[in-house]
Amino acid sequence: LHYYEQGILFIGRGGWLDDGVTIHHQLCLDLYEGAADASLAVRNDSLVKYYTEVIFQNVPFEDSLPAWITLMTSLESSGQHKRILDTGLTLIQRLNIDVPKPQPSPVELMKTMSTTIQ
């Protein structure tokens, strides 16, 4: 993690910018992905969130997919099940996949009606 952090400090926040002279975009992506993965390995969920958020803000969606997986793995390992579901649904929406809401079965409807009447 230390080496990734040092690389990020060396490149600076401007490394994401394409100024026509220096392009460090891929290097920044590699450093931030590495830092997120290393943060996951040492179970530092706040750093995983920070590094993945920086990636989400600076790269096209398609290039951020590994960061989404790292973030969701971090949420899973810390037992944040509600947040992982919300994050997963956000990812599915960003992929333009329509997920229909499940309809209750007739048995479930009857069960709910019978408990409501009582």
Image (tube, rainbow, N blue to C red):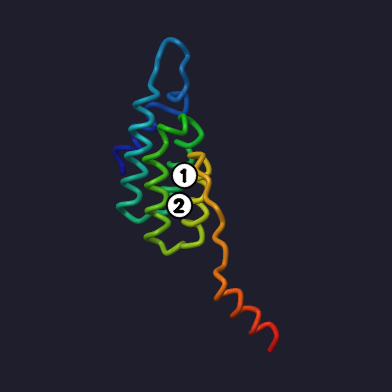
- Badge 1 crowding class, 10 Å Cα cut-off, few under 14, some 14 to 19, many 20 or more, is some
Residue with the mark numbered 2: 46
Q: Residue furthest top?
A: 21
Q: Which mark is residue 50?
A: 1
Q: At numbered mark 1, what does the secondary structure look like: helix, strand or loop?
A: helix
Residue 12 lies, in percent from the top left, at: 43, 28
Q: Are marks 2 and 1 in contact (CB under 8 Å)?
A: yes
If the image is split into quadrants, where does the N terminus sit? top left
Residue sitting at x 52%, y 54%? 86
Depth order, front residue of 104/54 = 104
Residue sitting at x 51%, y 61%? 82
Residue sitting at x 31%, y 54%? 42
Residue 21 lies, in percent from the top left, at: 42, 10
**Rounded to the nearest whole Å, what is the CA distance between mark 2 and mark 1?**
6 Å
Depth order, front residue of 59/90 = 90
Q: Which mark is residue 61?
A: none
Task: Inspect the image, locate mark 1, and give the three-letter code of the amino acid beneath it.
Answer: Tyr
Residue sitting at x 55%, y 76%? 107
Task: Inspect the image, locate mark 2, and give the three-letter code of the amino acid beneath it.
Answer: Ser
